[in-house]
Amino acid sequence: MSLTLQDIGRIANLARLELSTEQSERMRDQLNGFFDIVEQMKAVDTTGVEPLAHPTAVMEDVALRLRPDVASEPDRREANQRSAPAVERGLFLVPKVIE
């Protein structure tokens, strides 16, 4: 895929941007460079390659430093909701704002 100056002009118009000729040419070159990289990536055969859930999954000796999932604060829901104008079953009630 290759963009023309007319394509860049249309994109700029849709984005409400005013680009000079020099800026349009630079933008065209940058976007076409991006599309070239995408085409190179699409050309790589990834048949049989499992997707990674996390980039560090390929490194076996990397251990993520995660803290234990433990509640460290006391439950103060009732105290926090005392000043609320409307509460129902532990939830704040607010007026409808979307029609």
Image (spheres, rainbow, N blue to C red):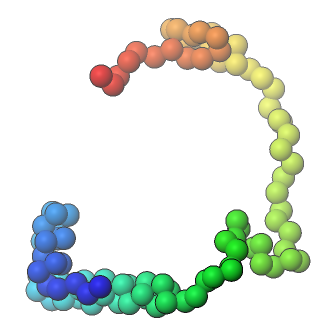
In the image, residue 79 lies at what x, y percent?
A: 69, 14
Q: Quadrant of the C terminus?
A: top left
Q: Is residue 29 left or right of residue 49?
A: left
Q: Residue furthest front?
A: 47
In the image, residue 83 lies at what x, y percent?
A: 58, 11
Q: Is residue 59 left or right of residue 28?
A: right
In the image, residue 89 lies at what x, y percent?
A: 64, 11
Q: Residue at x 86, y 69 (%)?
A: 63
Q: Is residue 18 left or right of residue 69?
A: left
In the image, residue 66 lies at what x, y percent?
A: 82, 57
Q: Residue at x 70, y 65 (%)?
A: 53
Q: How many marks?
A: 0
Q: Residue at x 87, y 48 (%)?
A: 68
Q: Residue at x 55, y 17 (%)?
A: 92
The answer to whether residue 45 of the structure is visible from this angle is yes
Q: Look at the picture and state if 95 lies above or below 66.
A: above
Which image quadrant is residue 65 in?
A: bottom right
The answer to whether residue 30 of the structure is visible from this angle is no
Q: Quadrant of the N terminus?
A: bottom left
Of residues 79 and 8, the one nearer the viewer is 8
Q: Look at the picture and state if 68 lies above or below 37.
A: above
Which image quadrant is residue 64 in?
A: bottom right
Q: Look at the picture and state if 25 lies above or below 90.
A: below
Of residues 80 and 5, the one nearer the viewer is 5
